[in-house]
Image (cartoon, grey):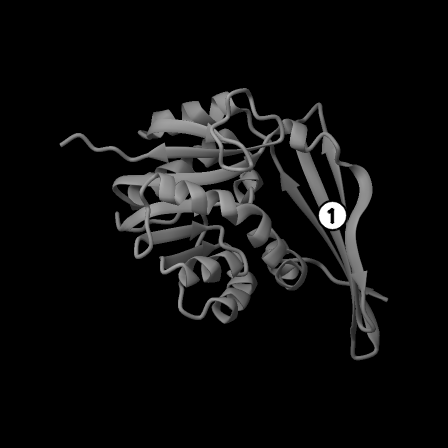
Amino acid sequence: MITVEIDSKYDSWAKIYNQYWGLEYCQQNLPPFEKLLKQYNILPSAKLLDLCCGTGQMAQHLIEQDYQVTGLDFSKSMLQYAHKNAPNAKFIHDDARFFNLPSSFNAVISPSGSLNHIMNIEELKEVFLRVYDALLDNGVFLFGLNLEDGYKSWNGSLTDGDVQDNYAWACCDSYNANEKTAQFKITIFELVENIWQRLDIINSVKPYAQTEIITALKNVGFTNINVYDRQGNLADDQCNQFAIFAGSKFVNK
């Protein structure tokens, strides 16, 4: 058995994400965002940036609703699947922390908690700044984040996996309450030229508190900031596990 070093962890599990999680995340996470897009008057034909778009299933669904969609992701392999899954979308290979796009989008969305992969608030603020610059005046930023209680159940147990004739994988997760960071580890076995190759991928994610997210959005310039629950309803109390944040780019001319 050969153990293969991982150069790009996101590229290495793109196949799994596309086959097992992409459509599921779309079905679970996108409906409240569609609801909120309409609530914020971002209607079909509007230009959307799907930030951290993954393998493109969400982009395709939004295109079917007549939105004009551009997807951006850090992983070239994920984008290869995205081009196939959403052939009428535009895709950009770039880092959410550093991209530079003109102010041309009515809304920027990131539905699946992908921004939890940003491991400190200063870099997350850089993401917010890039998004702000990419929005048109009165554009809206809608994104989902996992909060700390959403990770407290991560105890190192097996959470997902599958076995095929020439391919097998398993995923387990854990949470360090002292460091306030979580990890999910994906182990992949693949039969290549009659030799089993093993890939071990460790992905780190970080929960954030509502207050620090709201403060960071305000510091960048977003206004009309609201917090919603998983169903897209205005959150009366503190969300514990997952929250959807909305902020507007309002320019007083």
> Which residue reaches farthest bottom?
193
Q: Quadrant of the N terminus?
A: bottom right
Which residue sits at x=68%, y=36%? 182
Horizontally, residue 218 falls left or right of residue 60, namely: left
> Which residue reaches farthest right?
1
Asked whether 179 or 151 is in front, the reply is: 151
Which residue sits at x=33%, y=30%? 222
Asked whether 147 or 226 is in front, the reply is: 226
Q: Position of residue 136 (x, y in %)?
A: 25, 44
Q: Mark 1 packing: few (<14 Cα in 10 Å), some, or many (20+)?
A: some
* Figure check: 233 above or below 74: above
Q: Amino acid at mark 1?
A: Lys
* Figure check: 174 above or below 20: above
Horizontally, residue 64 falls left or right of residue 105, namely: right
Q: Dot 1 lies on which element?
A: strand
Which residue sits at x=44%, y=47%? 34
Q: Position of residue 142 (x, y in %)?
A: 42, 40
Q: How many marks?
A: 1
> Which residue reaches farthest left?
253
Residue at image mark 1: 185
